[in-house]
Image (tube, grey):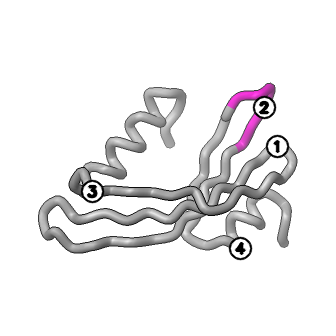
């Protein structure tokens, strides 16, 4: 588990390490859920070593308190993200 801004930077660095500069993401949908916001994100990039195209959809769940992000969880399944925020379950 990572913490703070340094943890967030480390998460991004680790995630992007295997891609070339051709990595791209688009935020396609936002869902407000109380103290959470779910962001549907489509990502694609080329593997740094193989050059293979990699694509995927992810649902990022941001938890807020006092106007600040206090948690980020990433899901590969929309229903799991909804359940984590109490919108489904």
Left/right placement of residue 47 relative to residue 40 reads left
Q: Residue at x 85, y 64 (%)?
A: 87
Left/right placement of residue 14 relative to residue 43 reads left
Q: Helix, strand or loop at disc 1?
A: loop
Label 1 sits on residue:
35
Disc 3 to disc 2: CB gap under 8 Å: no
Q: Helix, strand or loop at disc 4?
A: helix
Q: Residue at x 53, y 28 (%)?
A: 4
Label 2 sits on residue:
65
Dot 4 or dot 1: first in sequence order is 1
Label 4 sits on residue:
79
Disc 1 to disc 2: CB gap under 8 Å: yes
Which segment did they paint magenta?
A: 63-68
In depth, the one of 76 and 44 nearer the eye is 44
Gap in Å between the C-alphas at discs 4 and 2?
Answer: 23 Å
Q: Where residue 26 sits in the image (x, y, percent)?
A: 51, 58
Q: Is residue 87 magenta?
A: no
Gap in Å between the C-alphas at discs 3 and 4?
Answer: 29 Å
Which of the 4 image quarters holds residue 63?
Answer: top right
Residue 83 numbered mark, or none: none
């Amino acid at each position: 588990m990572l913490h703070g801004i340094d943890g967030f930077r480390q998460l991004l660095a680790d995630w992007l390490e295997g891609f070339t500069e051709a990595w791209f993401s688009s935020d396609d949908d936002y869902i407000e859920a109380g103290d959470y916001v779910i962001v549907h994100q489509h990502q694609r990039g080329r593997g740094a070593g193989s050059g293979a195209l990699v694509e995927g959809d992810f649902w990022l769940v941001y938890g807020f308190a006092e106007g600040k992000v206090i948690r980020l969880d990433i899901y590969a399944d929309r229903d799991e993200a909804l359940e984590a925020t109490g919108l489904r379950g």
